[in-house]
Amino acid sequence: MRRTARLALGIMTAGLIAAGGAGIFVYSGAYDISATDQHTPPVYWAMQFMMRRAVAVRADESETPAGLAQAEVVRRGFALYHRNCVQCHGGPGFSPEPAALGMMPVPAYLVPVGREWTAAQIHWVVKNGIKMTAMPAWKHRMSEDDMWEVAAFVKHGLQYLSQAQYREAAANLPAPAARARPSGVEGGVGNAAAGRRAIDQYACATCHVIPGITGATRQVGPPLRGMASRSYIAGVLANTPRNMVRWLMSPQQVSPGSAMPDLGLREQDALDIAAYLATLHGD
Ligand code: HEC
Ligand code: HEC
């Protein structure tokens, strides 16, 4: 009995000392967070390994659509790749843009990734992005078909293109169609839980204090606590669910010159975010 108690006390003391040491280390600012300081090899290896396992476990191979290797699918994927990915990952004969070269970790050249990864794994990463790297989630910005097509290109196209072929295909790309602007709000049902996640995907937290959203501590715009109980939105629109969706999708149309930019919200995301904001009553 006495021995177990002493052992427990020992473990607790060691734990406290370790926590205290970690606290002092963090507070001292000794850890170099600069993007010019590469991770140590063990940290780098552990992060890569963890990322690969996390993707392998989550990607559902049975969802892979048939016919991803068809030339037409790969061609559409090329257009998406050249518009959305080459600036960071580069391509045959194309360097990543300057901003991407300064990222840590630097975005990988995707030819070997196309060889080693399955299409479902590439699709998963494109859809969900990778935390603590600059890899964005495209889920709110590309359709499901688009995400499979770009994965099809990385898997079945990229590795077979010479520099000359890539350049020629890039030169022959038609100009991108202008993004369709929502004309009006159709109406629909929002989901507050999905809205809570969508808030992280549209930079709302960089400007608003929002209850329940980690990191939403800035006061560029008004705090959104108690939004559900407010009479007006931005002082100009009656606070109805429909008007909230309208505001979120086109603040610049409702209040030209407002510091809140049009963030390109999709209607479903606006509905979901409005549903979340409707849960924020005054406290
Ligand atoms: C803003 C820069 C940026 C953009 C744009 C971007 N990525 Fe990434 N991507 C990254 C970073 C950073 C990583 C993590 C570092 C790395 O490559 O391992 C990454 C990782 C990946 C990975 C995992 C590969 C690996 O070995 O880690 C894949 C697959 C991927 N991106 C595909 C894409 C595709 C396809 C697109 C276009 C739809 C795209 N990325 C757009 C920055 C970007
Ligand atoms: C660059 C900063 C910025 C970003 C990003 C931003 N907002 Fe705003 N937001 C503002 C400002 C500034 C106002 C005040 C606008 C006005 O009164 O004209 C505002 C107003 C609002 C209002 C009305 C608040 C009130 O008190 O009436 C809501 C709701 C809102 N924003 C939600 C959002 C959501 C949700 C997002 C993400 C989809 C978002 N905002 C992104 C700056 C921002």
Image (cartoon, grey):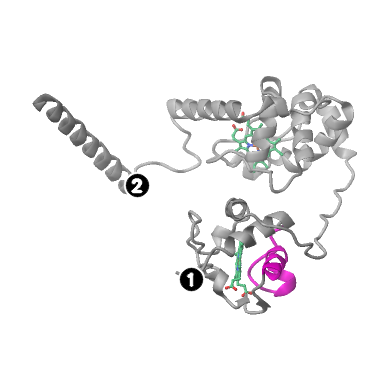
Magenta includes 170?
no
**Nearer to me, 113 or 93:** 113
2 vs 1, front mark: 1
Q: Is residue 195 above or below residue 92?
A: below
Does residue 256 appear anywhere in the picture? no
Vertically, is 144 above or below 270?
A: above
Q: Kindly identify the amino acid type of the residue bearing the numbered disc 2.
A: Gly
Q: Residues within 10 Å of mark 2 (few under 14, many from 20)?
A: few
Between residue 80 and residue 58, name the one nearer to us: 58
Residue indicated by mark 1: 282
**65 vs 159, nearest the viewer:** 65
Residue at horizontal 46 percent and vertical 33 percent from the top: 39
Q: Quadrant of residue 143?
A: top right
Residue found farthest to the left: 2
Q: Which residue is mark 2?
A: 29
- Amino acid type at image mark 1: Gly
Q: In which quadrant of the rendered view does residue 227 lie?
A: bottom right
Q: Position of residue 58 (x, y in %)?
A: 60, 30
